[in-house]
Image (cartoon, helix red, strand yellow):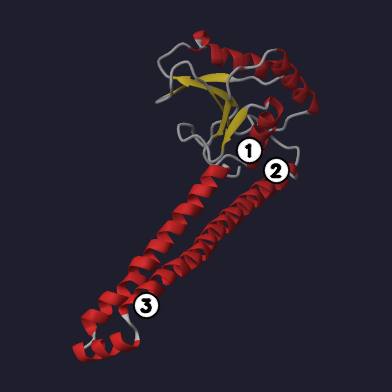
Amino acid sequence: MADPLYARIFTFVWALFENWWLLVTGIVLMVEPMMESWLHPKRLKWLNKRWPKAGRYKQIRFAALAALLVAAYLAFDAVNVRLTNATTELSATREQRDEARRQLQGLPARGWSIKPEQIRILREAVAKKPLGFPLLLATTPAAPTDSLALAYDLMNAVGDAIVVIGGDPEYSPNQSGIILGYAAGTDPEKNEKVQAVKALLEKAGFVPRYKGHHNFPANETIVVIGKFPSL
């Protein structure tokens, strides 16, 4: 999403001021002090006759105005480079996302997979009774690609969902099945979010089970997808 217009204007004006201030204080306004400090009195006297101070000060003011034009170009170039870099990074991120989708779409129907009928059931169930909160999906560490595929299928079917790629460190790589994580030490049967997600998954034919999740907020839940049970 592009920055608001006022933010872009502020960025440009601030870059313009920084460059102009550097040019004026570092170059233009230093001409006179440098001449008086470095030149021999005889040389300075000779220079003052051929380049009078009155005219010199006027030309220095014009140089400060010229520095404003140079600063405007430098500011525009800096903002343009920043925008180009941001666009390049965004394009690279989108390419990685698209490549991941292409790989997931090409997976064989082995292990975890979601059938069109299950997608239809999930979408209808969510349409009739929305969860009211984002569905947080995760995979076990080093999860097989079919687990990731199922996570993305569920995300696309439910709509308001987030997939945590890279796995949930609290679960073993050998964990199988669909697990409903909840805060350890609490009763999942009394957790409204756990029960809402459980009912949604059961309607689609999945059989989730509970597992206490340490360092997890109370009254929250996370769906952790492990290996397919029979693999």
Q: Which residue occupies 43% across, 72% down?
A: 63
Q: Quadrant location of residue 127? A: top right
How would you rate the neighbour count of disc 2 (Cα within 10 Å): few for under 14, some for 14-19, many for 20 or more?
Answer: some
Is 118 on the left or on the right of 152, as rendered? right
Is 208 on the left or on the right of 62, as rendered? right
Dot 1 lies on which element? helix
Mark yes or no: residue 179 visible. Answer: yes
Say what amino acid the circle numbered 3 marks: Gly
Q: Which residue occupies 31% across, 78% down?
A: 53
Dot 3 lies on which element? helix
Q: Earlier in the sequence, mark 1 or mark 2?
A: 2
Dot 2 lies on which element? helix
Mark 3 or mark 1: which is in front? 3
Q: Quadrant location of residue 178? A: top right
Res 148 label: 1
Q: Are marks 1 and 2 in contact (CB under 8 Å)?
A: yes
- Vertical comparison of 163 with 28: above or below: above
Say what amino acid the circle numbered 1 marks: Leu
Res 104 label: 2
How would you rate the neighbour count of disc 1 (Cα within 10 Å): few for under 14, some for 14-19, many for 20 or more?
Answer: many
Residue 28 pos. (x, y %): 36, 72
Residue 156 pos. (x, y %): 70, 31
Q: Earlier in the sequence, mark 3 or mark 1?
A: 3
Q: What is the count of numbered marks?
A: 3
Q: Are marks 3 and 1 in contact (CB under 8 Å)?
A: no
Q: Are marks 3 and 2 in contact (CB under 8 Å)?
A: no
In which quadrant is the N terminus drawn?
top right
Read off the residue under disc 3.
55
Closer-to-camera residue (172/158): 158
Q: How far is mark 1 from mark 2, CA to CA?
A: 8 Å
